[in-house]
Amino acid sequence: MTVEHLMLRPEHCDRLMRKSEMLEIAQISKSTLHAKLDPRSPYHDPSIPRPRYLERSRIPLWSKREVDEWLSKLFDHERAAGSV
């Protein structure tokens, strides 16, 4: 996986979440999250937001806006398929 360092520019200045909050909002487990992020996994999801890292930090952070958009698209897709 590549590491993306977050540059503090206006387009990135929405709220950042730690992994625990990301998991709570998405209602998935840590192992599911890691499987969705891993391109070698059969459960890989290329649409899931990638974590960002602040300079000199190993703590993954997710953009609240990106996570909300991702979940919204998932729900819209499920509604269109008639599964919700």
Image (cartoon, helix red, strand yellow):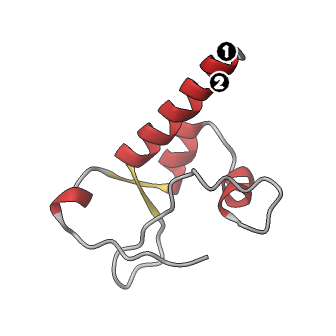
Which quarter of the figure has residue 42? bottom right
Per the image, the residue denoted by label 2 is 78
Q: List the single residue furthest toward the front.
A: 80
As drawn, 60 above or below 83: below
What residue is rendered at 29% in x and 50% in y? Answer: 15
Tell me if 40 is positioned left or right of 11 in this view.
Answer: right
Per the image, the residue denoted by label 1 is 84
Tell me if 69 is positioned left or right of 11 in this view.
Answer: right
What residue is rendered at 26% in x and 51% in y? Answer: 14
The secondary element bearing badge 2 is classed as helix
- Viewer-side residue, 61 vs 12: 12
Where residue 73 appears, as percent x and y from the top left, is: 52, 34
Where residue 46 appears, as percent x and y from the top left, is: 62, 56
Please report whichever mark, 2 or 1, sits nearer to the chain's N-terminal start.
2
Where residue 35 appears, as percent x and y from the top left, is: 74, 58
Q: Are marks 2 and 1 in contact (CB under 8 Å)?
A: yes
The secondary element bearing badge 1 is classed as loop
What residue is rendered at 43% in x and 75% in y? Answer: 4
Please tell me how crowded label 1 is: few (under 14), some (14-19), or many (20+) other residues with Cα within 10 Å. Answer: few
